[in-house]
Image: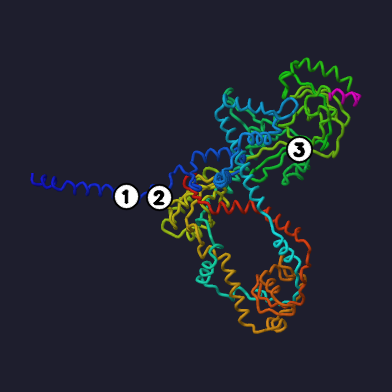
Amino acid sequence: MAILNKIRQKTVVLILVIALALFAFILSSLFDNKDALFSKSPDVVATINGQDISRAEFSNLVEFQQRQMGPNATTSQVMNSVFESKVREIVMDGQISKLGMTVESEQMRDLIKTNYASDPTFLNEGGVFDESKVKLFIDNLKSSSTEAYQNWISGEQALASNALQANYFNMVKAGTTATLAEGKLEHKLEGEKVDIKYVQVPFSSIADSTVKVSTSEIKSYINKNPKAYQSDATRGFQYVFFKEVASLEDEKAMQKELTDLLSDSKVYNEVTKATDNKAGFKNTTDNEAFVNGNSDDFKFVDKYQYKSSLPNVIADTIFKLNPGQTYGPYKDGNYYKVTKVLDFKRLADSIESSHIVIPFVGSTRAGADVTRTKEQAKAMIDSIYPLVKNSKTKFAEVANQINADGTKGKDGVIGWTRLTTYNPAAFDPDFANFLFFNDKGSIDVVLSQFGYHIIRIDDKKNVDNTVKVATIARKIQPSSKTEDKIFADASNFELAIANGNFAEVAKTSNYDVRPMTAKELDESIPGLGNQRQIVRWSFEDGTKVGDYKRFDNVPGGIVIAQLTAMQDKGVMSVEDASVTALPAVRKEKKAKMIMDRVNASSLEDFAKAENQTVKSASAINMKNPTIAGAGTEPMVVGTAFGLAEGATSKLVKGNTGVFMVQVTKKTAAVELENYLPFANQVSTQKLNSVQTRLYNALKESSEIEDFRAKTVQ
């Protein structure tokens, strides 16, 4: 009881203690989950100038852009394209909004008219753009499809945004010009010239191996030039790829399988309970069925081919065989094949032809207005044939009158068809057979999937030997036994690196270790292709240098990767920057070595001391500071223009070496009465670059937070 009374007396203190305890608990949870405390919502892909881009909006834009860019565009390419477009839109909209610029209804109508001026949907019977058709089209969208209507609204918004951006840049361009003083300076830079004599001691005259550069010197150079060594966040990792490839035993087994297919075999018949003789590839009479039933990926193609169309590994041999003979098994790329010769013919490579075609109900590409039956079409073509058989003029007249395909108005001329590009799957075989197996001048009635034709062969050229073959192909791939071994090898390697050095374990097992450096949004890895999962793992908060992970779902094998380096966004590490910083520091040290060891005041003394020759260069200008025999040297050229005629410079550190220069002649630029042409030249240069430079400046001054790497898979 006494305890309860004490608690009642201290009620306020007790409440404060409990409140503080709860607050501490909540705060510790937030610090344990930093993303919840400091980061944006996982539904925010980016924030640009305070405006969030949601995951849903971004995903919809990416999906739409993927359809626009096609299947060959990678996810990363599409995502980057959408992100940059959205950044541009928000950055520019902010500027346009500040100016109060808008697109009114009249201008919107003009934009739609300009953009859709040639769209057949909005043209009237006279081929003229009709605004009433646009209104009708939009009304139909409203009533039929909410999604389609929203797409149209998005399209209008894009038109308006582009127009406003164009107006914005045009306003800036209108104020972008050049003064006559700038024109005069441009003329002076181009027209003022100097002739010089010079001595150059190239940096290459000192061996790199003799110039030692310390890590501290590189670090000091980076600190002096931080802008040149800014880097995005990167991760370095190394990986071993356990590629699933067929073993030598697998390939030998495939070759045996193909060899066995050549010969006849005995097959037990479950129906007759007897042993039947099954024809092999050599003796089969149904080559198409045999190939299609025993070949991987490749199907039988009933066509004649020139030697140039055959694989190089068999072309010469095939043309030495007789019909019925086979060649193989042989290796062609990633397949083992057996080829059987079926027939030889001499055929023209190219055939020029014309036709008259009469479609009927049910024939391919027959228009909705076609009502005649197949029998009626046959009767019609038979009645026409005698009229056009021996008259090219009559043939052309009839073709222009009744053809409904692309040959209408062209006298029925189809043009040239080439055997080397002839695709049986896309070309009617009966039509093709008439062309390739009849002589020039032949004309006859032919039935095809498109209707009845009167086909005339107008010309043939490039007649040569062709062959028809049947080929069985088996893709070279690992057996289950080989796949099991690869799996075991990867597992053993994974166990070994748990207690050993990644590179050393790989070297012991003779595995190829491949290094890789990736940025946060990269997806492609050399030798592996699109492997976003590996890059994403390397940037995960929990992944530390030395960590490794196995990836089983890599196409064609298994990857085991280890993180080797982490570089946060900012100034590069000394190791990464050394690629360019080391040569720069070495060049500075070489320049100092040369300048410290020479005490010469004339070109001749400098040349003699350094075992060099005195060279000459003429008509040098400041606009293009290039010295003949030395290359682009702005510091040296600038020094020369600062000297009086006849004067000699001190030693000058250039791009390619240490120089001493003497001016032998100075030619002033010709005075002009009017520098307007040069001012216009400067103005054009400004206008050509203002749009890009202005946007880049606006973008650089914007606040852009990019969370794609964490929110988009």
Residue under pointer 3: 421
The vertical placement of 127 against 687, above or below, is above
Residue under pointer 2: 38
Q: Position of residue 325 (x, y in %)?
A: 74, 38
The vertical placement of 381 against 604, above or below, is above
Q: Is residue 336 visible?
A: yes
Q: CA distance from mark 3 to mark 1?
A: 72 Å
Mark 2 lies on a secondary structure that is: helix
Q: Position of residue 188 (x, y in %)?
A: 73, 66
Tell me where residue 300 sits by quadrant. Answer: top right
Q: CA distance from mark 1 to mark 2?
A: 12 Å
Which mark lies nearer to you, 3 or 2? 2
Residue under pointer 1: 27
Amino acid type, callout 3: Thr
Residue lying at the far left of the rendered structure: 2
Q: CA distance from mark 3 to mark 2?
A: 62 Å
Q: Earlier in the sequence, mark 3 or mark 2?
A: 2
Q: Which residues are magenta?
A: 389-400
